Amino acid sequence: MNDHAPDTVLHVGGDSPYDVVVGYHLADRLGPMVGDALRVAVICPEAMSELAEDVAAPLLEALDGREVTVLVVPDGEEAKTAEVANDCWEALGEEGFTRSDVVVTLGGGATTDLGGFVAASWLRGVRVVHVPTTLLAMVDAAVGGKTGINTAAGKNLVGAFHEPSGVLCDLALLETLPRDELVAGLGEVVKCGFIADPEILRLVETAEPDDLEPSSPVLRELVERAIAVKIDVVVGDLKEAGGSEATGAHPGREALNYGHTLAHAIERAESYGIRHGEAVAIGCVYVAELAHRAADLPADVVERHRTAFARVGLPVTYAGASFEDLLATMRVDKKSRGAVLRFVVLDDVGRPRILAGPSEEHLRAAYEAISGVAP
């Protein structure tokens, strides 16, 4: 492992600028990001509680003995509920958290979403520093300030925009990540290649899949490129105000939701038993099939979706729920406007736009193409 390669610092501009640091063994950077806070709450899932103690130790040292509290929450999407958020708020109240204090999230995307929302809502906003421990969280949830929890109606329907004070993407933390989780994180990476950076696709298509592991320079470049794509998009459209439906218009931050409309519906149908990156891969192939029928996306680009995601070990087909059930869930997607379904589609690689109101015929045909159901 090239532990001594210089850290990469990716700066996020805008009204609340911060840095995203990518490298190995970054604990010494955590104290400066926290700054002069009187108290720090480390929010982590049960599976990460031992590692949280390891992080709390250098925090205590950096804060010169100031108070660090570890709040352990359920693993995965089970943490993203109003009940768990309320438990965190109560704990912050008991610890006397003020606006000068800081929340640190340590975990995957679900922890980042929950912890960011807790920070956004406590006293109408306290600082948060993210230390993502999964590939998915590094390239997706930790950057951009989107926070949220789930409801019975769907995923991430309650939340806020709350940018972090800093993000530490410590690739050494990925060494204990199960291979399936690492592969799932590549779903968001490949997505970024399709919407903005063809070099990501070239790297994925030419690298040996087994070589994409935490110490790999190729994986590090993929992480940095995917983060750079997200930074570029969110700086220009932090609160998802873009999304013009004019043909050829860039959809702004909504571009990052490429493949997510069906992905979120699949996650709900599977009671969140499918990994997010796996659902995104399926969703991207679906929306490519939809764009082929409704917006003339070339067939070779559709096939490239299948081969790129499959090459890294991600699923590209799904038949686990009926089209009718998935369509009903997609209708409450955050991009919908009234009764009009809206999808991020491609005119070509790197050219995303909004497709509003596709016909049910095209929607169904695209699902048949990924489900193996005969038309």
Image (cartoon, grey):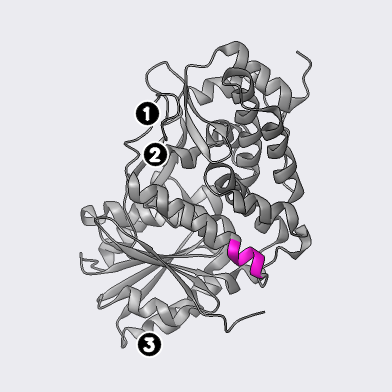
| Image coordinates for residue 271, horizontal then vertical, percent | 60, 37
The local crowd at label 1, few if under 14, some if 14 to 19, many if 20 or more residues have their Cα within 10 Å, is some
The local crowd at label 3, few if under 14, some if 14 to 19, many if 20 or more residues have their Cα within 10 Å, is few
Question: Is 111 rendered above or below residue 1?
Answer: above
Report the amino acid beneath label 2.
Gly
Q: Earlier in the sequence, mark 3 or mark 2?
A: 3
Residues at circles 1 and 3 in contact by the CB criterion of under 8 Å: no
Residues at circles 3 and 2 in contact by the CB criterion of under 8 Å: no
Q: Earlier in the sequence, mark 1 or mark 3?
A: 3
Question: Is 38 rendered above or below residue 314?
Answer: below
Question: Is 94 rendered above or below residue 80?
Answer: below
Q: Which residues are magenta?
A: 217-221
The N terminus, quarter of image:
bottom right
Report the amino acid beneath label 3.
Glu
| Image coordinates for residue 196, horizontal then vertical, percent | 52, 45
User: Which residue is at the front of the view, 271 or 108?
Assistant: 108
Residue at (75%, 44%) from the top-left corner?
310
On the image, which quarter does residue 29 sit in?
bottom left
**Disc 3 and disc 2: Cα gap in Å?**
42 Å
User: Which residue is at the front of the view, 294 or 156?
Assistant: 294
Residue at (37%, 28%) from the top-left corner?
244
Which of pointers 1 and 3 indicates the residue nearer the eye? 1
| Image coordinates for residue 212, horizontal then vertical, percent | 71, 63
Which secondary structure, mark 1? loop
Does the magenta portion include 90?
Answer: no
Q: Which residue is mark 3?
A: 61
Q: Which residue is mark 1?
A: 244
Q: Which residue is mark 2?
A: 252
Which secondary structure, mark 2? helix
Count how many numbered circles sit on residues in the image: 3
Q: Earlier in the sequence, mark 1 or mark 2?
A: 1
